[in-house]
Image (cartoon, rainbow, N blue to C red):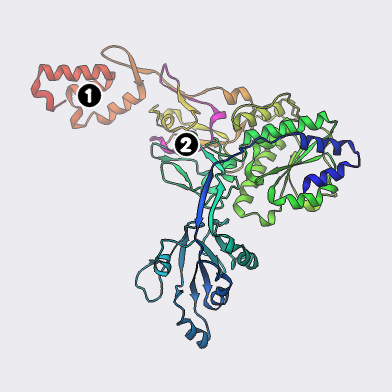
């Protein structure tokens, strides 16, 4: 549809219009030809939930399905209708119910009237563990997620149209495959380590309730995932990445698209990112925009974030527009998108660039739109590395050419950029922070007692702060602009090593040995010769204990 419109517009022989069409038709998007899928199995057992008057009136609309069960949350007001309900063997009454699951596997728990305990309604009503489909006519809905699972239709809450549901439900019987939208690499995850919980940005960013924490790791339910991509955008380490296509392929596509546009004689390119659901809107307004505006379709607008937007600027796009109707975007998606945009625009503003270089685009303002006359950057080759490496590469290039060169910039709340501070006078260099750091932003010096930190690798997960027994580590959100300072290992704390009193080998921070000696000197197990072993390395300590036992077997109980 959109391609036909672009082809018609190019018939005017305007140079940018012809170049745009040539670039779009000549740039092949790399994506998975056969993506991983998950399968749903539906037998057509539907549950209608709502007031008795409403659901009993609707029942006849779904008789083509395998079975229809009615769950009334309020009884009919008239006595005549109330008496007629007695004749129905598929009608149940419960003021409250909880729903979990997805197409073909909805478990509904409720306190059915006349039953003394909470029951699985499907077992009671149809002799199965679950319902396949749910039509929810309640005003508020039975689930709190913003994007419901496949097979759940919140008609009463206004999230589905009854006419469409009546038409579509008979087709919802059988086996259905859906793409698995994400890739998960637990080794990169900054959520938890050694029992300490850190980053939960992905969980907070999911509007479908598909992500959850087990305490030790993040779990993604592929049956609940709707592919909006906010989890991947919010993830600072790429432990979660979008798969259709992945961000690297999207960015390479943008690079080739802009390159082909310029080769075809196009000038002043502006990229218009939009989700597939907005194609009709883009098709409607594209003629009102300058022909230098190049539309780029995404599965969902929020599947790409700040690294892709800045990469586009690096590849020569004069401006990056994010097109959507915010009125129908769930609050969670809107929040993630706006937080990411606020961070991007704050970086631009701090360097003196116009924040509209990356901006939301309102379809109603198409006729008044005019782009920027010049590019900020035009790198010769595609950027390489992970999402953070690409972002910082672009920021460093922009900073080099910036009119304003700040030393450090504050960031929006929960943004994954910043440093840590250490009260070195109280630090014992126990390395508890190092043991939980997921990115090695914190690590040991190695040849002597000391703690190093690399700001560029820090995602502000907070695990170091929680793991510190002395509570001397704290987060310091922000961005240091000097690339060398940001990338180099900075010494947070170092001190002299305690040397073994037996062999002379350095074996621990002197402050730690001193602290242990002071705390344990009055302990019953560290009296006499035992206390001096705290000043020995591990090997000498073991030898000393063994020697004591050999020389005096009766001392075994004392060592």
> Does residue 117 appear left or right of residue 264 in this picture?
left
Position of residue 401 measured from the top left corner of the image (x, y, whole percent):
75, 26
Local packing at callout 2 (Cα closer than 10 Å; few below 14, some 14-19, many 20+) is some
Judged from this view, the residue extending furthest toward the left is 554
Q: Nearer the viewer, residue 40 or 373?
A: 40
Q: CA distance from mark 1 to mark 2?
A: 43 Å
Residue 205 at least partly seen: no
Q: Which residue is mark 2?
A: 186
Mark 1 or 2, closer to the camera: 2
For residue 65, above or below residue 213: below
Quarter of the image where the C terminus is located: top left
Q: In terms of image quadrants, where is residue 10? A: top right
Residue 301 percent location from the top left of the image: 67, 46
Q: Residues within 10 Å of mark 1 (few under 14, many from 20)?
A: some
For disc 1, the marked residue is 531
Q: Position of residue 39 (x, y in %)?
A: 51, 50
Q: Residue furthest top?
A: 503
Which stretch did the figure color magenta? 445-470
């Amino acid at each position: 549809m959109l391609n036909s419109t672009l082809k018609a517009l190019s018939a005017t022989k305007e140079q940018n219009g012809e170049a745009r069409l040539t670039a779009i038709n000549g740039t092949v998007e790399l994506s998975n030809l056969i993506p991983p899928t998950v399968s749903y199995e539906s037998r057509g057992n539907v549950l209608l939930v709502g007031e008795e008057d409403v659901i009993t009136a609707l029942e006849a609309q779904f008789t083509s399905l395998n079975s229809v069960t009615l769950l009334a949350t309020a009884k009919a007001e008239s006595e005549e209708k109330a008496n007629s309900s007695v004749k129905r063997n598929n009608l149940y009454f419960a003021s409250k119910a909880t729903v979990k699951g997805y197409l073909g596997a909805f478990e509904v728990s409720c306190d059915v009237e006349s039953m003394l305990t909470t029951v699985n309604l499907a077992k009671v009503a149809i002799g199965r563990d679950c319902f396949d489909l749910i039509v929810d006519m309640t005003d508020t809905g039975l689930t709190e997620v913003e994007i419901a699972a496949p097979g759940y239709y919140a008609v009463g809450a206004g999230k589905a149209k009854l006419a469409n549901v009546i038409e579509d439900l008979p087709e919802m019987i059988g086996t259905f495959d859906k793409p698995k939208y994400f890739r998960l690499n637990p080794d990169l995850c900054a959520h938890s380590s050694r029992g300490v919980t850190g980053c939960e940005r992905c969980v907070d960013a999911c509007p479908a309730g598909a992500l959850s924490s087990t305490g030790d790791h993040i779990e993604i339910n592929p049956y609940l995932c709707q592919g909006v991509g906010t989890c991947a955008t919010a993830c600072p380490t790429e432990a979660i990445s979008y798969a259709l296509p992945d961000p690297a392929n999207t960015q390479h596509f943008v690079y080739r698209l802009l390159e082909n546009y310029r080769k075809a004689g196009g000038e002043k390119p502006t990229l218009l990112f939009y989700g597939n659901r907005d194609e009709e809107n883009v098709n409607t307004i594209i003629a009102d925009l300058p022909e230098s505006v190049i539309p780029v379709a995404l599965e969902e607008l929020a599947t790409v974030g700040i690294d892709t937007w800045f990469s586009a600027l690096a590849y020569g796009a004069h401006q990056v527009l994010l097109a959507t109707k915010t009125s129908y975007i769930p609050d969670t998606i809107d929040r993630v998108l706006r937080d990411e945009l606020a961070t991007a625009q704050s970086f631009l503003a701090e360097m003196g660039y116009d924040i509209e270089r990356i901006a939301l685009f309102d379809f109603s303002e198409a006729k008044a739109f005019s782009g920027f006359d010049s590019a900020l950057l035009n790198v010769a080759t595609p950027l390489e590395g992970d999402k953070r490496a690409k972002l910082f590469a672009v920021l460093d290039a922009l900073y080099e050419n910036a009119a304003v060169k700040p030393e450090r910039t504050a960031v929006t709340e929960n943004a994954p950029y910043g440093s840590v501070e250490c009260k070195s006078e109280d630090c014992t260099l126990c390395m508890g922070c190092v043991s939980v750091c997921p990115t090695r932003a914190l690590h040991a010096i190695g040849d002597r007692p000391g703690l190093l930190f690399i700001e560029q690798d820090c995602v502000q997960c907070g695990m170091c702060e929680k793991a510190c027994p002395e509570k001397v580590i704290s987060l310091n959100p922000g961005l240091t602009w000097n690339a060398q300072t940001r990338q180099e290992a900075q010494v947070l704390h170092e001190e002299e090593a305690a040397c073994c009193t037996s062999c002379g080998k350095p074996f621990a921070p002197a402050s730690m040995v001193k602290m242990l000696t002071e705390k344990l000197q009055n302990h019953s197990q560290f009296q006499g010769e035992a206390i001096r072993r705290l000043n020995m390395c591990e090997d000498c300590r073991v030898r000393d204990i063994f020697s004591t036992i050999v020389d005096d077997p009766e001392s075994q109980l004392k060592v």
